[in-house]
Amino acid sequence: MSTANGTPEEGPAGAGTQAQPPEQAPAPASAPGQVAAKTGHEISVSGLNAYYGSQHAVKGIDIHFPANEVTALIGPSGSGKSTVVRCINRMHEEIPGARATGSVTLNDVDLYGPSVDLTSVRRLIGMVFQKPNPFPTMSIRDNVAAGLKLTGTKPNDIKERVEKSLRSVGLWDEVKDRLGSPGIGLSGGQQQRLCIARAVAVEPEVILMDEPCSALDPGATLKVEELVDELKSRYTIVIVTHNMQQAARVANSTVFLMEGEVIEHSPTNELFTRPKDERTERYVTGKFG
Ligand SMILES: Nc1ncnc2c1ncn2[C@@H]1O[C@H](COP(=O)(O)OP(=O)(O)OP(=O)(O)O)[C@@H](O)[C@H]1O
Ligand SMILES: [Mg+2]
């Protein structure tokens, strides 16, 4: 890819006559007795550079995010974690003056390829932000249904998908009698699960979470962490966190970023107990950052 903000190759979101990433890779048929093959979707970032004007925020990094795993991104403030996440679903280029080079693939599809349209990228790669951000004027039901309406889901199916999504984040029983009430009337933890329900409602393949628990109390954090653990059977998850314990609890592997570079990417347990790089060791033991 080589995308500058506003280059002509990026049609408006929804321009849509272009080729799209595959909806679902066909699952290989497994014979009786065989372990079912994983059906998830992997992301590979290669040679990714991201800039804000002349500032080089992400410096030629390679990261592989395996299918159906949780990968944590950790690192000091300003190390580029949010930028990397925004490059994965092509939100980085929406920032005035921002651009990126390199490649990001979902399975074998280059998400920055000229024939990929932005709407499908954002449907396939959902995002959950630091601060719960339900649409303020919408009811609980409409918050979850918002993306479904945009993608043309039939009204009858929407009802079913709203319930299924709310159930999948453990919120259904808490809200089923008040689906018409405003989403912002929920507690912070409930709002964050509502936002996760909104993200999963459109059946993405990857979920990006940028510090999803930083505004939550320990009880709500625990619920979101349990949810992440459940969701990874269906989705590939990337989670940015400043909380080492959280990375240790939820992530299969962890990437340590510093000053826009990947210092180390290892199985989580190894990164915390036997870091390969002295900078990782200093960071995870709280000596800086
Ligand atoms: N919208 C922006 N405009 C200009 N520079 C930006 C913008 N967003 C981030 N940056 C810069 O890019 C670098 C990486 O920022 P980024 O937000 O990706 O870091 P981060 O690791 O997510 O930090 P934090 O832990 O504080 O959220 C920083 O130097 C930051 O100042
Ligand atoms: Mg950030």
Image (tube, grey):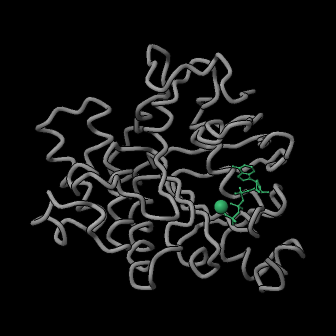
Task: Give whichever of 214, 88 is nearer the camera.
Answer: 214
Task: Give whichever of 211, 251 is nearer the camera.
Answer: 211
In the rendered image, the vertical position of residue 138 relative to residue 100, given as above or below: below
Residue at 49%, 51% in the rendered image? 127
**Residue 45 image position (x, y, % from top left):** 70, 43
**Residue 270 image position (x, y, % from top left):** 72, 75
In the rendered image, the vertical position of residue 243 relative to residue 113, given as above or below: below
**Residue 205 image position (x, y, % from top left):** 45, 44
Q: On the rendered structure, is 213 left or right of 96?
A: left
Task: Give whichever of 217, 24 is nearer the camera.
Answer: 217
Q: Work out which residue is located at the far right of the displayed protein and give it.
A: 278
Q: On the rendered structure, is 2 left or right of 28?
A: right
Quarter of image, res 172: bottom left
**Is residue 239 visible in this depiction of the protein?**
yes
Residue at 78%, 86% in the rendered image? 285
Task: Give whichever of 119, 239 is nearer the camera.
Answer: 119
Q: How many marks?
A: 0
